[in-house]
Amino acid sequence: MRSKLKEDGSLIRVENLSFAYETEDIIRDADFFINRRDVITVVGPNGGGKTTLLRILMGQLKPRKGRVLISGAQSRIFGYVPQYSTMDPSYPITAFEVVLSGRVKNFGFYSRADKQAAADALEAVGQEDSGHKSFFELSGGQRQRVLIARALAPDPEVLILDEPTANIDAEAEKQLNVLLKKLSLEHTIILVTHDLGFVNEMTTRVLCVNRHVKEHPVDSLDDGLIASAYGRQVKVVRHDHDLHHHEGGAE
Amino acid sequence: MSGFLAILSNPDIPFIRMALLAGVVGSIPFGFIGSFVVVKKMSSIAGAISHSVLGGIGLALYLETVVGFSLLKPMGGAMLFAVLSAIIISVVIIHGRERLDTVIGAVWAVGMSLGLLFMAKTPGYGDPMSYLFGNILLIGRSQLIMIAVFSAIILIAGILFYNQLLAVSFDADFAETRGINTAWYQIIIMLLISITVVLMVSFVGTVMVIAFLTLPPAMASLFSKRLSVMIGLSIIFSILLSVAGLYFSFIFDLPTGSVTIVFAGALYIILRVVNTVVKRIRMV
């Protein structure tokens, strides 16, 4: 399995993959690969299977058909950055504890190396002074960075970010963009986003997920591509130097 | 106060001393596990488990009186039903095939009903009040030893699995991506809740044990940014409440469980108001 991946140089290869929760396929006949240092943007409508695809890649869901070939152990290769808005804001936890939980194992206490890795990860995202603060007292941008630090703490090969610009302001978005560009030099990045302006410059490949998974060249991020991915007309408009997309109706 | 201290040191009246020790020792697992119950918003689950134990108590009383099988004992029956309830609810949470609230309600009501039915069919035993609302006269030496042993087990398990329980309770999806067996830890926390609940049934009863499990951590959460600090404060609040409840029930000749819970409720309201006022003053 690994030798095959080494031969074609890819880090992850998805072959003929289908997935269904009940009887109807959520993902059907997906074939694609991800190379090292790729920055993959995953677009598609809600319910189109983006999150399901990520969960299959991370080993949380088993495909009905097909397979996922990964160069490395599934739990070590991925660093997942979820949306913090899904978390309970009353949970008593500091930013450092959040990052340290990125090093958690099935049994045992944290070692000195774990704590050092957590401190290094916080420093890597520029939040070394936030460690002792309550996670939910931080700004949206700071929380996003702390969650990226948590994902970085176990030193993963691939960073997966789920809607990283949701719930953060424009200034935090700019800073996040700079951080991700820096991280893309050493990591493969998979971004699930609706904010195409945010990723346009750094994206190497685009995957459109709407039951089927189709790859598109980076320079094809335009109205037509987005409309085909979302299954309806979507207008992409330019705001200053950034690209954003707007839908005609509620998604 | 001197009268209370005299009773505590009187060798002919051991039950107050036993109740005090049970309250203090039981407060440790209660503060620990109660904190996870509060941060995970599992009080309805804990409520279902605590009420279902009446079924096990009724079964033990019935077996002892009618069948002549005396090995189970009420606390053993309570533990059996608590663990069974925890497993049923865990399976539903993990597999998600049924509506969780429906199952919680069913476990809650069916367990209690079974208990009342068993007690109704147990000759010479028709009063479930002691188990519903607590009775410190039920706390004997053997039960005190059981509380101490299980408290130690819960504390050791809680310390051993603390990092995992924190990671899973904060963000189970992320923990799963790190290869953590979240279903296993879900079952562990449920089993720890079920054992904890049984420990204080005699003190506050099956109906009110949920308040003793959640109010001290709720008070502690007002003063803590970290779960570990919340657990420490919660244990301190639990000890204070159990001692105060016993003291005031002795002074005013009232049921210990009810006095403890009313005292806990009043203290929580006071602390909540003070906390809100202090925060507003700081903001000005």
Image: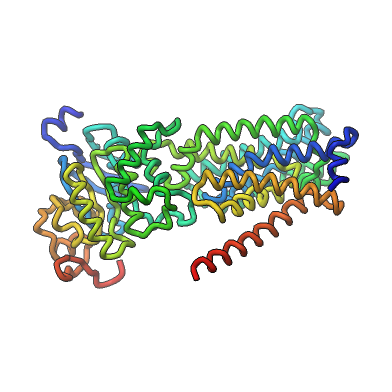
The answer to whether residue B218 shows anywhere in this view is: yes
Residue A110 percent location from the top left of the image = 42, 34
Residue at 88%, 45% in the rendered image: B3
Nearest the eye: A155 or A161:
A155
Residue B256 percent location from the top left of the image = 79, 49
Nearest the eye: B154 or A177:
A177
Left or right of A216 in this view: B189 = right
Residue at 36%, 54% in the rendered image: A143
Residue at 18%, 62% in the rendered image: A197
Residue at 16%, 43% in the rendered image: A37
Left or right of B114 in this view: B137 = right
Q: How is the image coloured?
A: rainbow
Residue A92 percent location from the top left of the image = 49, 51
Count of numbered labels shown in the rendering: 0
Residue A194 percent location from the top left of the image = 24, 60
Left or right of A224 in this view: B67 = right
Using the image, determine if residue B275 lies above or below residue A37.
below
Nearest the eye: B101 or A203:
A203
Nearest the eye: B239 or B148:
B239
The answer to whether residue B55 shows anywhere in this view is: no
Left or right of B219 in this view: B143 = right
